[in-house]
Amino acid sequence: MQRVVFVCVVLLLAVATAGFGAGAAEDEVIRIGHIRDTNHPTHLGALRFQEIVEAETDLEVSVFPDSQLGDPQEMFAQLQTGDLEMVYGGINTFAWIDGAEAFEITAIPFLYRDYEHMREAMHADFFQPVIEEAEEETGIRIVAITGDTAPRGLSTRDREVRSAEDFEGLTVRTAAADSVLRAMEALGAIPEQVPYDELYVALQTGVVDAQENGVIATMTDSFYEVQDYYIQTDYIRDIETFYANPGFWDGLSEDERSVVEDAAEEAGELVTELTQRELSAAYEYLEDHLTVIRDPDIESIQDALDGVYDDWDGDLWPEGLLDKISDL
């Protein structure tokens, strides 16, 4: 009888141990999604992240590119429900969900001088309360803000744009974002919404005179064929950001979290390097096809936009935050 009881106990322990092992293995898989294609710097950065984490921990990383897990809002929702561990995507997109509206400040036109300025602002002591409040409100953790992306610029037909006054009367296809519409209208331009797949023809036929998708899009989508100038305004910037589900994050050991953070930073460095290469190649190509204006008077544009976002100061984001970023 004792032998029978002993055997039963051993079998029960074996079953319990097997079940625990299966659950632990499942917990050790990090699924990370992003919206870029497999040739994009962001995807290559995600693969570098995967390589480092798998080499230095027992964690397994699965990367899902090209919106396989949905658009940014859909992936954020999966982070909130715990159905996804991580997302690698722009800091601008965080403002699209309830509780993170303050991150609209990351997409304010003509605010950030370059990638280093924007990254310094996101890591400044005065910005940390914004991050902490958004994490609390959204249930999403920001692991690392790192990885340059191609900024938005301006291409035009029949008009050089070198200062604020040159925007007057310019019909420009823009995104529907309120921040962009405010800026263009304050400069005297006429913003228009045209579906992206109709933009080439709209530029060709003069429905709009200009577009602001940036130098790489101007090259890859052949907008240079129907435009005369490209102006390096770099007027909206973004930084790729590693987001995580807090439950997943808290379940990692201290050493694992350290590796993940270091891997994220290395991935961001690679993304930045590759992005700069792509930008250099695009400018080199465009210079053979249209006139590139590298040094527009950004200060005159910033002066013209002074006060445009005052009603958001202290409402969408903490009062004085815009000036703190500008003054860095």
Image (spheres, grey):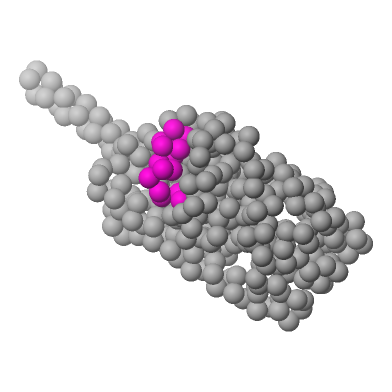
Residue 143 colored in magenta in the image: no
Q: Residue at x 41, y 37 (%)?
A: 129
Residue 133 colored in magenta in the image: yes
237 or 23: nearer the viewer? 237
Compared to residue 17, the image places residue 272 above or below, namely below
Kindly indicate the quadrant of the structure image that contains residue 102. top right
Kindly indicate the quadrant of the structure image that contains residue 95. top right
State the residue lying farthest toward the left: 2
Q: Is residue 246 visible?
A: yes
- On the image, the x and y values in percent for residue 210 come to 80, 60
Judge left or right: residue 220 versus residue 117: right
Compared to residue 216, the image places residue 24 above or below, namely above
Numbered range of the magenta stretch: 121-135
Q: Residue at x 55, y 47 (%)?
A: 106
Q: Residue at x 45, y 49 (%)?
A: 122
Q: Residue at x 49, y 52 (%)?
A: 327
State the residue lying farthest toward the bottom: 288
- On the image, the x and y values in percent for residue 263 come to 36, 57
Compared to residue 157, the image places residue 126 above or below, namely above
The kind of secondary structure the magenta stretch mainly shows is helix
State the residue lying farthest toward the right: 205
130 or 67: nearer the viewer? 130
- On the image, the x and y values in percent for residue 128 come to 40, 41
Q: Is residue 54 visible?
A: no
